[in-house]
Amino acid sequence: MVSTIAGNSSKQRRRNVVLIAGTLLAVLVLIYFLNPRDSQVLQQTPETAIHQAVPITGTDETVIIEEMPDQWLQASGSSSGNPAWAPAVVSPIDTLWSISTGREIFSPPALQGNMIFIAGNDKTLRGINRATGEQIWSRTVTCGLSGGVAADSSAVYLSGQDGYMYALDLETGSEKWKTGLGYHIFTDACVFCDSLVLAGNSMGSIAALSRETGDLIWSDTMDGLLLGPAVSDSTAVFSTEAGAVGAWDLSGSTLWSRGFSSQPSAPSIVSGVVYLGFSSGKVLAFSLQTGETIWETALEGVQGRTVVSRPAVYRDSVLVAGTCDGRVFCLEVSSGTLLWETQLENWVSLTPAVCDTIVYASCDDGKLHLLSLNTGLAVDEIETGSYSGTPPILSGGVLYTGNSAGVFTAVSGTVPAAESTTEEE
């Protein structure tokens, strides 16, 4: 009898344990389905939140490939101000080719087909084979070249400090036409609606020239030395060092104009919104249609004149720019919310290039700084050998940069795996 009672008690205890365990499991399952994400949200850090604010696509096994535009019709290849097409590249890098001109290279180059067109203060525009660095042709003018170069399938367009706009044959560099605008031209060359070439001189005169002949079609004036332009569809936007910003249509009619007490950057345009940086340390977003302010963001800790570069906009999502007090910062484009800010050791006066995972920022410390697009943290750096010259361009896994010592370099590098936006379980 004793052994029978003990056996029954043991069986009862086992049944109780199973019953309790089953009850606990049922409660846990119920809690999970009622509120499955709460524990993750409570553990989310500010850095994770910033990661989610930047819509990076791809996984650790995926490399994003992007093609640049068929024609380079304005500075940076598009109105976004962002001359970068994935994939990103990092060290170790190999120099594909390098050329030395002996004078500063400040003019943003143009990429067209298998060619890159490089202009500098040595008064020369060079047509270079992108793959080999071989010079196919060159054309020398009377003064330095500092405005951005534009190119289509048949011609290269450039502005000169001698006051002339030039159209050169794409294959040979022979002159198709040149038109004088009366004063020095520092603006970027820009093809407007496939029929006009836009430029502006140092006295504030805007000129729209026939793309085929160079004849003057219409003109207008602004206050101050002209910057830009950026063109989106049938609207062109210029700014000036005196604080003016304005928009024109294809016929030359002024759509809107505004004046500011601080100096704006050259404009960038994406999805009907104009973005400008200002020497007050601010970034403003305007309606392309009306010129009305959509949002305004002021950087903190600004002391005195803090010039903001032309913004680079990535995929209608984030805006990245640099400042003369050594900052690189990233804003959310719909609201102007600051996502991150990184302090470097010297000026970042050129527009950064923003790729699928990496920001390329040229700094006057003689380095090209590679920062994480998600966080702004340093990923890598590349020695440039001198002060900044041209904004970096990234296309087809090749990085193109020119510096103030007159050296232009093309390098290839390692393509990193895209950052994952999901937490490992």
Image: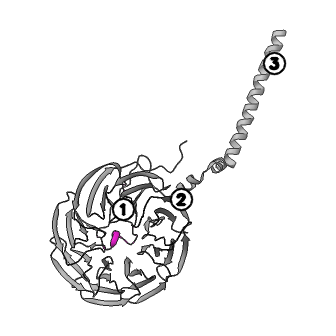
Q: Which mark is residue 53?
A: 2
Query: According to the image, label 3 marks what residue?
Result: 9
Nearer to us: label 2 or label 3: 2
Q: Is label 2 in contact with label 3 (beta carbons under 8 Å)?
A: no
Query: According to the image, label 1 marks what residue?
Result: 84
Query: In terms of secondary structure, where does tag 3 sit?
Result: helix
Q: Is 107 inside the magenta-drawn segment?
A: no
Find the distance from the CA under tag 2 to the CA under tag 3: 60 Å
Q: Toward the viewer: 136 or 271?
A: 136
Please identify the quarter of the rendering in which residue 361 is found: bottom left
State the quadrant of the C terminus. Answer: top right
Upstream in sequence: badge 2 or badge 3: 3
The residue type indicated by label 3 comes to Ser
| Percent coordinates x, y for residue 78 in the rendering | 36, 70
Give the residues drawn in magenta, as a range: 71-87
Find the distance from the CA under tag 3 to the CA under tag 1: 76 Å
Q: Is residue 396 visible?
A: no
| Percent coordinates x, y for residue 275 in the rendering | 46, 73
